[in-house]
């Protein structure tokens, strides 16, 4: 998956995290979002996903397994 995905952690107590949390309707913490190349949310999970769930979500949009 190298070069295909980036993982970003945001602090929603400060900007820009707070603005992004509002924009993407984050109502619970933690929330895991996966975006496609156009910036659309294609996967949303409340709670901390395990490693396999993260890999599966990213592979679903990159087309790689």
Image: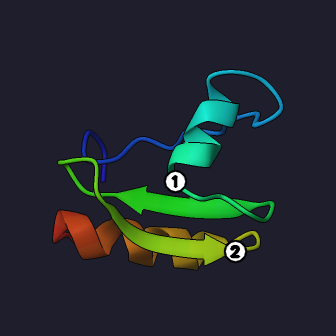
Say which quarter of the image contains residue 48. bottom right
x and y, in percent, of residue 41 in the image: 37, 62
The quadrant of the image that shows the N terminus is: bottom left
Label 2: element kind? strand
Residue at figure coordinates x 55%, y 78% from the top left: 53
Judging by the rendered image, the residue that carries numbered circle 1 is: 24
Label 1: element kind? loop
* 15 w.r.t. 52: above or below: above
Q: Residues within 10 Å of mark 2 (few under 14, many from 20)?
A: few
* 49 w.r.t. 15: above or below: below
Residue at figure coordinates x 68%, y 21% from the top left: 15
Q: Nearer the viewer, mark 1 or mark 2?
A: 1
Q: Earlier in the sequence, mark 1 or mark 2?
A: 1
x and y, in percent, of residue 42 in the image: 34, 70
Residue 63 horizontal side relative to residue 59, left or right: left
x and y, in percent, of residue 45 in the image: 60, 75
Judging by the rendered image, the residue that carries numbered circle 2 is: 46
- The answer to whether mark 1 and mark 2 are in CB contact below 8 A is no
Q: Is residue 65 visible?
A: no
Observer-nearest of 23 and 10: 23
x and y, in percent, of residue 31 in the image: 68, 62
Observer-nearest of 14 and 56: 14
Residue 20 horizontal side relative to residue 3, left or right: right
Q: Which mark is residue 62?
A: none
- The mark tally for this picture is 2
């Amino acid at each position: 998956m190298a070069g295909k995905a980036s993982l970003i952690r945001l602090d929603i107590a400060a900007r820009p995290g707070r603005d992004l949390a509002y924009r993407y309707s984050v109502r619970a913490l933690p929330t895991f979002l996966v975006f496609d190349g156009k910036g659309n949310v294609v996967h949303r999970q409340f709670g901390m996903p395990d490693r396999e769930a993260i890999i599966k979500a990213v592979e679903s949009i990159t087309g790689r397994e």
